[in-house]
Amino acid sequence: MRRIGVAVAAALAVVTVACTAEPKALPATTTTTTTTTTTVTTTTPPTAVPGPGGTTVPVFQHPYKYGTPQAKLPASPDGLLPVVRRIETDKPYVFITIDDGAVRHPAALELMKSSQTQPSLFLNTKHVAEQPAFFKALQDDAKSTVHAHTANHPNLQGKGYEFQKQEICGNADYLQQQTGVRPTLFRPPFGNYDGTTRKAATDCGFKALIMWTAAVNDGVVQFQAGSKLVPGDIVLMHFRNTFVEDFLAFLNHCKAHGLTPVPLEDFLSTTLP
């Protein structure tokens, strides 16, 4: 019996070993490393863009935040508004002003916006009245500032006080009505003025009488002195049929001589910059 028990025990041991599953191998572990690459794209501002009629329009980046005071209005020695012919500045800045409004050139708005310039506009009532929306668009969309140039563009020099005041104040009243902003600068037609002009303009609330040191006519920049624009120059233009040629001549001259057109108003502030 003892032998039988031992034999049975041995047989059971063999069965137990045979029925035990072999351990399975664990799946291999794969480690994945993800690398993220960030690409920084730097956009260089354009120096020129296509313009009307196949032209090329120079582009000027703003050297400061336009609309912030940069220089204070010069003082007047006699209590009347000062006469400003140029701006005293050590920066490479010049100032473009455009007069009258007789020709509403369809490319004017595009040129101002494309070049990123903000001209000062000295306008006559009689011209604005023909198409107020044209000048309102220049103010709203191109950020130009509208100023006064009399109602009917007369030669003011030698005229009586009441006549001059009516031309100047009436023009300011009309422009305020059309644009929502009262003009603060005044330019006499033909650049002709006298003491009565300054008195009338002062009484109408203007802060400065603006002249110029250079002009653009028929696509040519002309200078009162020297052979090129210099920092501080105030440039005169007109709304004429040659608007595109004149405006581009001014812009190209500025580019060639390292100058930037900036808003005249920022340098005639009544508050400290």
Image (cartoon, helix red, strand yellow):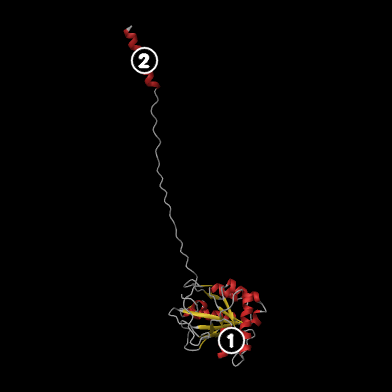
How far from the left and from the top, in percent, is residue 173? 63, 79
**Which of the two discs, 1 and 2, labels the residue nearer the N terminus?**
2
Relative to 258, say whether 7 is above or below: above
How far from the left and from the top, in percent, is residue 49? 54, 72
Q: Which residue is mark 1?
A: 200
> Which secondary structure lies at badge 1?
helix
Kindly indicate the quadrant of the structure image that contains residue 192: bottom right
Relative to 116, say whether 122 is above or below: below
Residue drawn at the location 33% of the way across and 11% of the way down: 6
How far from the left and from the top, in percent, is residue 44? 47, 67
Amino acid bearing label 2 = Ala
User: Which label number is shown at residue 107?
Assistant: none
| Residue 218 in view | no
Residue drawn at the location 34% of the way across and 9% of the way down: 4
Q: Which residue is mark 2?
A: 11
- Give the class, few, some or many, for how many residues have Cα within 10 Å of label 2's Cα (few <14, many ≥20): few
How far from the left and from the top, in percent, is residue 199? 56, 87
Amino acid bearing label 1 = Ala
- Give the class, few, some or many, for how many residues have Cα within 10 Å of label 1's Cα (few <14, many ≥20): many
Q: Quadrant of the N terminus?
A: top left
Q: Residue furthest bottom?
A: 158
Viewer-nearest of discs 1 and 2: 1
Numbered marks: total: 2
Kindly indicate the quadrant of the structure image that contains residue 19: top left
